[in-house]
Image: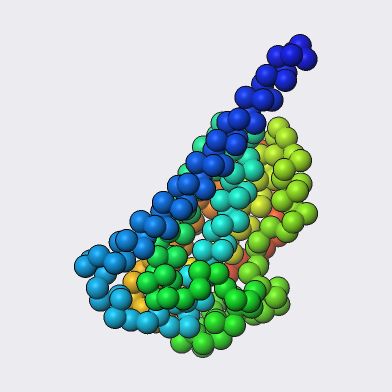
């Protein structure tokens, strides 16, 4: 490709990527505002009467922050990855921005900080299901990592920014799968231990949606002859005790 044409392609991609990022930010702000307005309506009146317990607030703060990084990773590959991976990244961005708006809407309604005040996941120690082995396993995993496990490091994000072609696709899938597995474990923990039924229901939905996306990511990795990154999966679907 002639140098001038290559420059035009790069400029076009930069403009597209920049527009996507700005659009994503504006969408995120709009969703948070919409979530707040929804919570001020009559529909969730019963939830406004509940202050939100330790597990509720801890889950909302940390899961929203966890979602923030997923949106960042999806934004990094937007317009640079293959069409199939770009479509997946767009889907993840859409789903997680909606959930972030909902979660921070709850926090604003309860007048709680939108971000966790510490990286510690100490809120899990107050869970009511701590006698259940999977809950204990996830609590130990978080305690051992000093925060949310499965998060991409700064070095990994820089590798993602520098990657291209098939390497970009594979690295994105690997990082996002590990990220999803961590979120699934956290959501299932909240499903079992949240004090507010509406938070537990939201956590159940998040776990289901991310499990479906994780299955898609595994399929794409197999098609690319690539292996997932190591992550201790916590199986808790079997013998689920009654709520």
Q: Between residue 176 and residue 61, name the one nearer to us.
A: 61
| Residue at the image position 74 percent from the left and 56 percent from the top | 154
171 horizontally vs 60: left or right: right
| Residue at the image position 37 percent from the left and 72 percent from the top | 109
* Residue 82 appears anywhere in the view: no
103 horizontally vs 4: left or right: left
* Residue that extends furthest to the top in the rendered view of this protein: 2
| Residue at the image position 60 percent from the left and 36 percent from the top | 18
Quadrant, the C terminus:
bottom left
* Residue 75 appears anywhere in the view: yes
Q: Quadrant of residue 4?
A: top right
137 horizontally vs 184: left or right: right
| Residue at the image position 78 percent from the left and 54 percent from the top | 155
Residue 223: give x, y in percent of width and height: 62, 38
Colour scheme used in the picture?
A: rainbow
56 vs 10: above or below? below
Residue 196: give x, y in percent of width and height: 36, 78
Q: Between residue 84 and residue 196, name the one nearer to us.
A: 196
Quadrant, the N terminus:
top right
């Amino acid at each position: 490709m002639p140098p001038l044409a290559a420059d035009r392609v790069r400029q076009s991609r930069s403009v597209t990527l920049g527009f996507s990022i700005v659009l994503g930010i504006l969408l995120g702000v709009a969703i948070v505002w919409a979530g707040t307005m929804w919570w001020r309506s009559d529909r969730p009146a019963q939830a406004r009467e509940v202050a939100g317990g330790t597990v509720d607030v801890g889950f909302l703060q940390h899961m929203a922050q966890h979602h923030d990084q997923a949106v960042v990773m999806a934004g990094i590959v937007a317009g640079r990855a293959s069409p199939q991976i770009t479509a997946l990244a767009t889907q993840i961005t859409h789903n997680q921005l909606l959930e972030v708006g909902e979660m921070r809407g709850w926090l604003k309604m309860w007048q709680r900080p939108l971000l966790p005040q510490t990286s510690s996941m100490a809120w899990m120690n107050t869970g009511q299901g701590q006698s259940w082995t999977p809950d204990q396993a996830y609590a130990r995993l978080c305690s051992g990592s000093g925060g949310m496990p499965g998060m991409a490091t700064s070095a990994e994000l820089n590798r993602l920014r520098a990657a291209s072609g098939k390497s970009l696709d594979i690295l994105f899938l690997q990082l996002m799968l590990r990220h999803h597995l961590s979120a699934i474990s956290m959501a299932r923990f909240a499903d079992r231990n949240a004090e507010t039924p509406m938070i537990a229901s939201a956590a159940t939905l998040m776990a289901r949606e991310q499990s479906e996306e994780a299955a898609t990511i595994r399929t794409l990795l197999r098609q690319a002859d690539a292996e997932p990154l190591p992550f201790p999966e916590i199986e808790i679907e079997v013998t689920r005790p009654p709520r």
